[in-house]
Image (cartoon, rainbow, N blue to C red):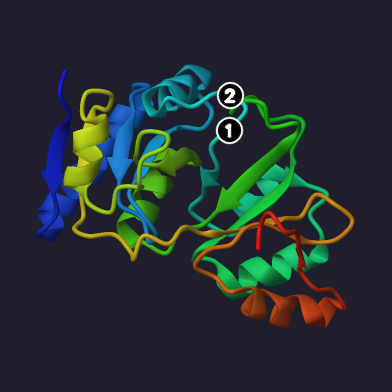
Amino acid sequence: MPATTYSIGTEEEEAAAISAAAMAVHRGELVVIPTDTVYGLAADAFDPESVQLLLDAKGRGRHMPPPVLVHSVATLDALATQVPDYVHSLVAEFWPGPLTIVCRQQPSLQWDLGETRGTVAIRMPQHELTLALLERTGPLAVSSANLTGQMAARSAAEAEAMLGESVAVIVDGGPSGDGTASTIVDATGPEPSLLRPGALSIERIDEILATHGLHLAVSESAS
């Protein structure tokens, strides 16, 4: 069944879109939402069947688990354990925003995001509509709204062209950011390391890490 698209123009339309998307998530369905980077394909992070639907819709295997978007900084410690002090400094500076942190996940979490090897990638987006939805739904597994191997959607129309038959609701919030993905930092090793360059520069991250006597390790594959 084709997705229902909700366009945002007024406060009433925004409220209707958020409500429809939240109800779809609670039913175990997929939704497309705007974020501060690109459009995202979202599912309930705590519903393994929904997460598998997300992976299937993208044509993606379990070896590429989706990151999790959260509504508040406080959620970090609910989802992650053994969080280094420097991570708290980074999120205080850059959340909400285009920084994704890979941490060790809380072992008590009842979810299945794929082959995470005990880790979870977490981000708080800088997008009011997305944050309002996250407040209603709790953490969402969110990957870029595109088929694997295709460019990430920067508009609702682009997302619908690729994923319209796989999702229940598309929230059209207008153009997303410039299409640059979030910067991903791995905080599970002995030192912070760059997994993916993105919208947040290494120099800005290093400014914060320097207060902890650290710097961001950058591999050749991530540079």
Q: Report whether residue 7 is seen.
A: yes
Residue occupied by mark 2: 62
Q: Report whether residue 20 is seen.
A: no
- Name the secondary structure under disc 1: loop
Where's residue 202, x and y in %? Answer: 65, 73
- Name the secondary structure under disc 2: loop
160 horizontally vs 120: left or right: left
With respect to residue 209, does 144 lie above or below? above
Q: Which mark is residue 207?
A: none
Name the kind of residue labelled 1 in the image. Answer: Pro
Res 3 → quadrant: top left
Q: Which mark is residue 65?
A: 1
Residue contact at pointers 2 and 1, CB within 8 angstroms: yes
Where's residue 19, x and y in %? Answer: 24, 40
Q: Nearer the viewer, residue 191 or 150?
A: 150
Badge 1: residue crowd in 10 Å (few <14, some 14–19, many ≥20): many
Quarter the N terminus occupies: top left
Q: Nearer the viewer, residue 102 or 159?
A: 159
Where's residue 54, x and y in %? Answer: 42, 27
129 horizontally vs 156: left or right: right
**Residue at the spot x=36%, y=40% of the render?**
150
Quarter the C terminus occupies: bottom right
**Residue at the spot x=29%, y=28% of the render?**
24
